Image (cartoon, helix red, strand yellow):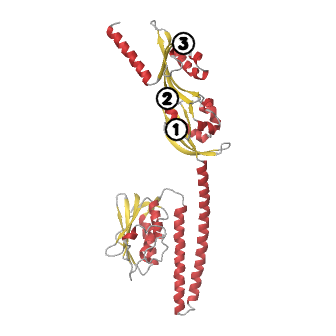
Amino acid sequence: MSEDSRRELERTKRFLNLVLETGEMNGSKVDTDLRHTWVHNSSPEPPAAEILGKTDEELFPSDISQPTTELKRDAIETKARVEREFSFIKPWGQNRYRAAAEPLYDTDGDVEGAMFAAIDLSDRYRFLERTTDAVFTVDSEWIVTFWNERMADRTGMAANEIVGENFWEAVGEHVPSKLESEYRDVMATGSSREFEHYLPEPLDYWVEIRAFADDDGLTVFSRDISERKEYETRLERQRNTLEILNQVLRHDIRNDLQLVIAYAEFVSDKLDEEGKGHIETVQARANHAVELTKTAGDISKVLFSEASASEPVNFRSVLERELEDARSSFPESVIISEGPLPNVTVRGDDMLESVFRNLLKNANQHNDKEMPKITVSAEERDEDVVVRIADNGPGIPDGHKEHIFGKGEKGLGSNGTGMGLYLVQSLVATYGGDITVEDNDPDGTVFSVTLSKVTRSAV
């Protein structure tokens, strides 16, 4: 061997030692009887001198020696490289290793042993022990590679009973078919997924599950959410009770008010002018109370409805219908539509009409002019449509503008409930839109509502 070859061989040996020590790797060579002929041990125990000449079965308990012995034997018998991962259960936790073995050949080309290398992956799993979630991992063959204490507490199966076993053979009979389908699909697609699942008797609890797959297999985090689900169920029950109570009260109150209005009309003709004036006040207040029950009904629909995606609604037809109703309800007002209304479909639902109804009613009821004038216009833009409802009323002071959409906020001198604009703002927000208020010129207020378009309707 030349000096240059000898120097290069020495450098290679130093480099390999550097890799082994820096990477905290274990390495060894064994003969065909699997006895160690060379060893590098990253831990101080056992020392190398005690390892040489012995097999893994002579040095370690069977649960530790079995996977390394099989790996080396397989490399010798198959005359090929073999790679595997395996776990050891120790008193202080679970140790995970990735190992590989390749055959060694003599000068005649015959197998004379194997070389073996393993790297400790345990640090990658340490945080899984510290998490409050129940966690397990399996390799691509569904062999359990990690099972933390929370998982052991939940299933009653300790890590040393299941690590190294096939997941489906060990616990498959206790895994609901739907959950099995989710796990297998995540593994097959290499995707990630989050879902909630109820585990029936004898477990009887809800879990929130996050499953992740990669080339090494599947990792599953599960969290007991039984208390949260119980709380949600209790809230749902209370919500349903309140909704029924609200419907019954509004129905009964409205019926009684209609009787008050009818009797007031009946006795009005029998009274003098002063008496008729009092009856008109009674009728006005009763009609106002009826309107209040309608507003309360609209608000309850928003508060009690399940969160759901909005649906396409024809903008022009809804607004035109509300304009006609407003003209009938407020004959003393001049309500005009300035320019054509865009025939577009916007995000909304059957409550969109309540947005326009309350804004038109607000513009009329709070107007102090002898002849209230309300102008409605709409502008179609690339992604949305903006409708502006302008009045010639007293306007809203700047210091009050930012508060008018709050619950119970009333305009100056208002006889309203203060809930109409709160309802408008809540609905528009549900549709993903926006509402603003500004001064009109020369006087009054302009409310601008922006609604997202869905598709352009055929004209």
Q: Give whichever of 294, 47 is nearer the camera.
A: 47
Residue on which disc 1 sits: 186
- Looking at this view, is 246 or 360 the one in front? 246
> Residue 72 location in percent, x, y?
53, 17
Q: What residue type is labelled 1?
A: Val
Q: How far apart are marks 2 and 3 (CA)?
A: 25 Å
What x and y, as percent, mark residue 379? Answer: 35, 64
- x, y (%) of residue 442? 31, 75
Secondary structure under the numbered disc 1 in the rendered image: helix
Could you say which disc has been placed on residue 121 in the image? 2
Residue 261 lies in quadrant: bottom right
Which image quarter: residue 238? bottom right
Ranked by sequence position, the earlier of labels 3 and 1 is 3
345 to 206, vertically: above or below: below
**Image quadrant in which the C terminus is located:** bottom left
Relative side of 263 to 12, left or right: right
Q: Which of 448 and 347 is in front in this view?
A: 448
Q: Which amino acid does label 3 sit on?
A: Arg
Q: Earlier in the sequence, mark 1 or mark 2?
A: 2
Q: How crowded is mark 1: few (under 14 residues within 10 Å), some or many (20 or more)?
A: some
Residue at mark 3 = 35
Instruction: Tell me whether circle 2 and circle 3 mark residues in contact (CB < 8 Å).
Output: no
Q: Marks 1/2: CA distance? A: 23 Å
Relative image position of residue 428 (x, y in whole percent): 44, 63
Which residue is at a point 58% across and 71% down the rendered structure image? 250
Callout 2: SS: loop
Which one is in front in this view, the residue at disc 1 or the one at disc 2? 2
Q: Distance between the residues labelled 3 and 1?
A: 42 Å
115 left or right of 402 in image: right
Does 437 sit above or below residue 26? Answer: below
Res. 76 visible in picture = yes
